Amino acid sequence: KTIYLSEYRVPAYLVDTVDLRFELFEDGARVHSTLSVRRNPESEAGAVPLELDGDSLKLESVSLDGVPLAQGQFEDQGDRLVVSQVPESFELTVVTWIEPQNNTRLEGLYKSSGMFCTQCEAEGFRCITFFPDRPDVMSRFRTRIEADSKSYPVLLSNGNDVERGDLPDGRHFVTWEDPFPKPCYLFALVAGDLVEKRDSFKTCSGRDIDLRMYVEPRNAEKCDHAMDSLKRSMRWDEEVYGREYDLDIFMIVAVDDFNMGAMENKGLNIFNSSCVLASQETATDLAFQRIEAIVAHEYFHNWSGNRVTCRDWFQLSLKEGFTVFRDSCFSADTGSPTVKRIEDVTLLRTAQFAEDAGPMAHPVRPSSYMEISNFYTLTIYEKGAEVVRMIHILLGPEMFRKGSDLYFERHDGQAVTTDDFLQAMEDASGRDLSQFRRWYEQAGTPVLEVSDEFDANACVYRLSIRQQIPDTPGQTNKQPQHIPFALGLLGNRGQALPLRLVAGEVDAPAERVLELTETEHTFEFHGIDEHPVPSLLRDFSAPVRVRYPWSREQLLFLMSHDPDGFNRWDAGQRLAVDVIQELVGASKDVAVDPRLVTAYGHLVSDASLDQALVAKMLQLPSEAYLIELADAADAPAIHAARERVVKHLAIALRDELVACYRRNAESEAYQVTPEQIARRSLRNTALSWLLLINDEEGRELAVRQFRDADNMTDRMGALRALVNSDYEDERDRVLSEFYTRFQDDPQVIEQWFSVQAASDRAGSLPQIRALLEHEAFDWKNPNKVRSVIGAFAGQNLAEFHRADGSGYDFLAEQVCRLDDSNPQIAARLVTPLTRWKKFAPAYGERMKAGLELIRDKSGLSRDVYEVVHKSLAD
Ligand code: ARG
Ligand code: ZN
């Protein structure tokens, strides 16, 4: 069944207050829910029956205004409770029985490592009790939790704890009250034996906020980084957006079994352990940065998501796109802005562009869906953030801030739409964003074809830009979009040329943001007396593909001269892509372009360059990105070509790499600073390249680094380099040493799984199957599933795309297996197969066969059904 945006109707009934009482036991939980309900004055539906959503509930009783309803006065339809005759306003009490201990879907109330916890977004609250489970029904919640005092000393829910006490039989209770009306997807409950870490924050208006983290005792020492990130996020949101925290308590809980990264429940954020717990010994630099970003993201939702929420799930990007934009600016302010931009764009161009070109392509504001869980996508999150970023570019920082102030003020306490967001931006700035709205409505990545010509006699440089938006499922003949296009022009000594759009313009800027609104534009730059090198789409000012016939000489020139750091990096990527593509499927006689060696040699050796940027520039384009760029992709051939280039560079630059390693290996007290991150990244890149060419000194350095490292970045860097090398004995030895050392730490073991599963050396299919049998593997834990199956199908591309199709069949088999226990995770694992049209027919047909295998499984979940059927549709 498909849900359409066009069918949106306001709710027929509103729920002003919700009074919940949870009796938690080992064999289940009883949920008493009392709702004060009234007919919605804005609804035209009139005196219709009351309909509440439900899922996997055992209904025990229903009463209306205190009077139990008899059979016939209500109907339990399983996924719906219908009460036919209800007054204008009334109290409804519903008692349900649920079994959290058997909840493997991890939606609603479930158990994870002995504790009770919840995940209600998007539609998990209906797995707890019957309720109008839609975000435009906002209520004040009061929640009483009762449980055994010994096993569950900590009982948490949203808001403030207002009452607690003991009960008979060694049980106790705590009552929580949340003063802010909220949709039920923001409800949360936690009960467990957890340690509490406390801190505090003084807000800009002088209020003291109690900050508390709750984790399992063994993780007590892994909270500092998240707590520190939280305090910096709170300050940042005050300074940059004028947003102050509103409750007296802010809580963070870490749970091991979690479908996603984290959840912004009001005052009680719940995190996947891997997205919040960190220590120097157990978390890599990447993990530290990820945690900082996710803590900020969930905190920022308190305004962009909670105080102002979504009217319906088609508006998901209203909160997600905006909040990703906010957390990304926060990370940029904290670390290196250029590096952060490179990381965001890498993800966007590799994964979101692929999504936008695949069978699940959808607009930032979709117009239909079958299962909303499938729409927590890179398009909603990452492209959505790019769309907000373009508004920021078009309006400028001051007007953007005026717009966000107006948005928060106008819609505080409301459930609204992406149009309301744009309207506030328009009203505050006076800018017309009507054409810009198409970014929300049209799917697909716009392609910009750029061509130029230099008229030496007239001293005019002409740039023509043609935009075209590809067809996507259900959408053809798209209208041109409003695109901010930042650019500069470089003269042949590397100098920035003034951009005169009219002849004789004085004080012309060296960089401009051109606004593209038509299918085709031609811009003339005057007073240009040499053929310039264009630096296009600076800082990636719009989520588009740019096609321009750069010569390799021009790219080399931009790599060293472009004042825009992002474009310097991008020129290097384009050059490397060009060189690798030339070698895909080519004979050994085709040489690796020596200019690439020269350019990389310069990067490796010149310590005066910005080392953070150099560390990024040395990362060759990933296989996944090369596949995304290819037409009829041959993954093993792409893998081979890419590896050939790395080996070629490593052999040619062998001594420089050793020197680079040593230069960046000096020991210093571990800190997560951009400088140190860059140094560790450089030395680990050097190490991995040296090992790829079986360099003896490299092997010694790696083994020593593995043993002596005082942090996970270096230990993992050495482990990864050895695992991906041909030193088989060493590989087995370090893998088992690593396991022995960290076997009690699930987050580290997840990294240990994925380094093997992602490796073409350690991750052949029999080895992957062995990992699934490993004592530390757990089918019920999404992180474990992702770290083996997800890493294999998503990163170990040469093995996954074996010509015999065994990788595809393997994935299909695991998806079917997981579909019964956790459909959300199963649906996500299918993703690599959905891209079958991207690959050469020999591969594509086998991938399609894998999808058909899944399609034919009986009792397929709605989640997997939607993905598989859309992928197989023509
Ligand atoms: N709102 C959460 C976040 O982005 C994600 C929740 C995802 N839940 C889901 N069922 N897909 O921070
Ligand atoms: Zn979010």
Image: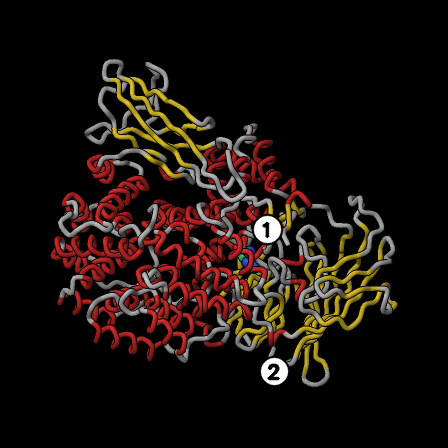
Q: Kindly identify which residue carries mark 2.
A: 150
What colour scheme governs how the chains and residues are painted in the rendered image of this protein?
A: secondary structure
**Image quadrant where one finds the N terminus:** bottom right
Image position of 402 (left or right of 735): right
Q: Quadrant of the rendered structure where residue 292 is?
A: bottom left
* Extreme residue in the bottom direction: 169
Amino acid tagged 2: Lys
Q: Nearer the viewer, residue 226 or 339?
A: 339
Q: Secondary structure at mark 1?
A: strand
Image position of 101 (left or right of 834): right
Q: Kindly identify which residue carries mark 1.
A: 369
Residue at (43%, 69%) from the top-left corner? 222
Image position of 211 (left or right of 683): right
Q: Quadrant of the rendered structure where residue 128 is?
A: bottom right
Circle 2 or circle 1, nearest the eye:
1
Residue 707 image label: none
Residue at (53%, 55%) from the top-left corner? 869
Percent coordinates x, y for residue 695 in the rendering: 14, 64
Q: Secondary structure at mark 2?
A: loop
Looking at the image, tell me whether mark 2 or mark 1 is earlier in sequence order: 2
Amino acid tagged 1: Tyr
Percent coordinates x, y for residue 65 in the rendering: 86, 63
In the displayed structure, 830 sits above or below 152; it is: above
Percent coordinates x, y for residue 621 in the rendering: 29, 50
In the displayed structure, 523 sits above or below 843; it is: above
